[in-house]
Amino acid sequence: MGKGWEGVVLKLLRGKDFTFTVTGAEQVTEHYRRIHLSDGGLLAAVGDSLHPTMWVRLWFAAGGRPHQRAYTLVDPDPVAGTFSIEFALHEGVASDWARGARVGDAVEATVQGTGFTAPQPAPERLLVIGDPASLPAINSLLDAHPDTPATIWFETRHASDAELPVRLDPGRHELRRVARGEGLERAVRAELPDRLGDPASAYVWLACDTVTTRALTAYLRKELALAKTRVNALGYWRPDA
């Protein structure tokens, strides 16, 4: 499949292309699907660059045109050359592909732009804000900091989102569920300052819709005076998408 002008730009930026093959699938909830994949040599190629929240760009065809969407690697196994990718299902070409994916299907991918810098000094508590689209990254972050307490503000849309596999340790993790439309930003503003601790060693990881991400990033940086290095923010989706 041709990748259009986006593919040309990524190639100029030294993006590396791979082909993944579906080895299985699980319907986690009616709105969430996990696809198991062989990595086409990706994990061997990235080697020591493998990191928490690592993502790849998958390519899908619709109407004769290429579309790329970014997804986080779930449980990458460099020895086996496998990982999974989880899809928060909605209308769209990527979700359509995930719904119909069968063993043996192939999907093209490009790795370019992903990165993660562990916070130093290490935070006393992780402060995490996200939703089903960023759940794979949230879980990888919790896995990477197994001894660090965490508070997670998790925006939900469907009743079945309560069944999603958040990797919680009840002794260390506090999960604050917020139904979409009930004010994720308002909840974070009201509750996060009491859990912040020393701003110099605080760490906030934030990935939800672009509007909320932008508003909360401004709040954290300007009103709470957190340093840029203590906030990792990325808008995962547009509210009108």
Image (tube, rainbow, N blue to C red):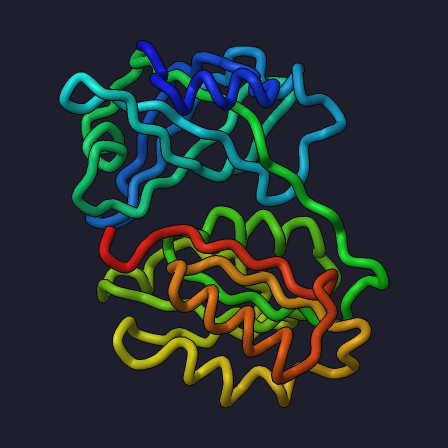
Number of residue marks? 0
Give the percent coordinates (x, y) of residue 156.
32, 66
Left or right of 63: which side holds 157?
right
Q: Would you identify the image quadrant in which residue 149 lies? A: bottom right
* Picture residue at 44% right of the left edge, 20% below the top: 109
> Which residue is at a point 37% across and 68% down the rendered structure image?
155
Residue extending farthest to the right is 121
Residue at left offset 59%, top offset 36%: 114
In this rendering, the answer to whether 97 lies above or below 64 is below
| Towards the viewer: 28 or 74 | 74
Residue 223 screen position, x and y as percent: 61, 84
The N terminus appears in which quarter of the rendering? Answer: top left
User: Residue placed farthest to the left in the image?
Assistant: 63
Near-viewer residue (120 or 217): 217
Q: Residue 122, position in %: x, y?
A: 81, 62
Residue drawn at 70 percent across, 74 percent down = 226
Q: Quadrant of residue 194?
A: bottom right
Q: Position of residue 163 (x, y in %)?
A: 33, 59
> Taking 105 as reference, is 143 left or right?
right
Q: Is residue 138 above or below residue 79?
A: below
Q: Nearer the viewer, residue 185 or 87?
A: 185
Left or right of 178, for residue 57? right
